[in-house]
Amino acid sequence: MRSKVKKVVAVISVVFLLLFVVLFYITYGYGLSLRKAAIFNGWNDLKEAQLELQKDGKLSNNYGHDYVFICTNNIVIGSTNYQCAIAVETERFNGEGILTVATNQVLIWLDKKRGPKIIGIPPNYNPPIFLSSF
């Protein structure tokens, strides 16, 4: 009788452990996809703003809840200087930073805690696996 109870408890434990692992994997993947989508949407806003700036010479800032603005900061990453052109701040970034595009079309993430870094142009961008940042 005791061996049957032990087997049932073991099977139930394994099932719950597998269920936990599967749910964790799905949740984690969902979080990564949200981060990737936020960068992709920000990049689209930046491209639209660049076209608008070239055409009209100003930004209308009709980008929904995203705040797109002209950015003239000079950013140094490694030993290379980048001149920012346009930046976007959105609630999708959870207050973690600002996405900007340099005058030479390099996409830069200005992290509020870790400093600036160059990220790939979507769809080549992949969020970090273990960091809770973009």
Image (spheres, grey):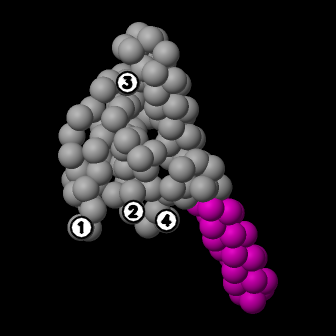
Front one among 39 and 74: 74
Residue 80 placement: quadrant: bottom left
**What residue would you read off at disc 4?**
129
Residues shaded magenta? 1-25
Q: What's the amino acid at mark 2?
A: Leu
Q: What's the amino acid at mark 1?
A: Ser
Q: Earlier in the sequence, mark 4 or mark 1?
A: 1
Residue 125 appears in view: yes
**What residue would you read off at disc 2?**
131
Badge 1: how crowded within 10 Å, few (<14), some, or many (20+)? few
Q: Earlier in the sequence, mark 3 or mark 4?
A: 3
> Which residue shows up at 36% across the image and 49% down it?
109
Q: What's the amino acid at mark 4?
A: Ile
Give the quarter of the figure containing the N terminus.
bottom right
On the rendered structure, is 50 left or right of 25? left
Judging from the image, what secondary structure is the residue with disc 1 in?
A: loop
Q: Earlier in the sequence, mark 2 or mark 3?
A: 3
> Residue 104, relative to residue 15: is it above or below?
above
Mark-to-mark CA distance, 4 and 2:
6 Å
Mark-to-mark CA distance, 2 and 3:
26 Å
Mark-to-mark CA distance, 1 and 2:
24 Å
> Which residue shows up at 75% across the image and 89% down it?
3
Mark-to-mark CA distance, 3 and 4:
27 Å
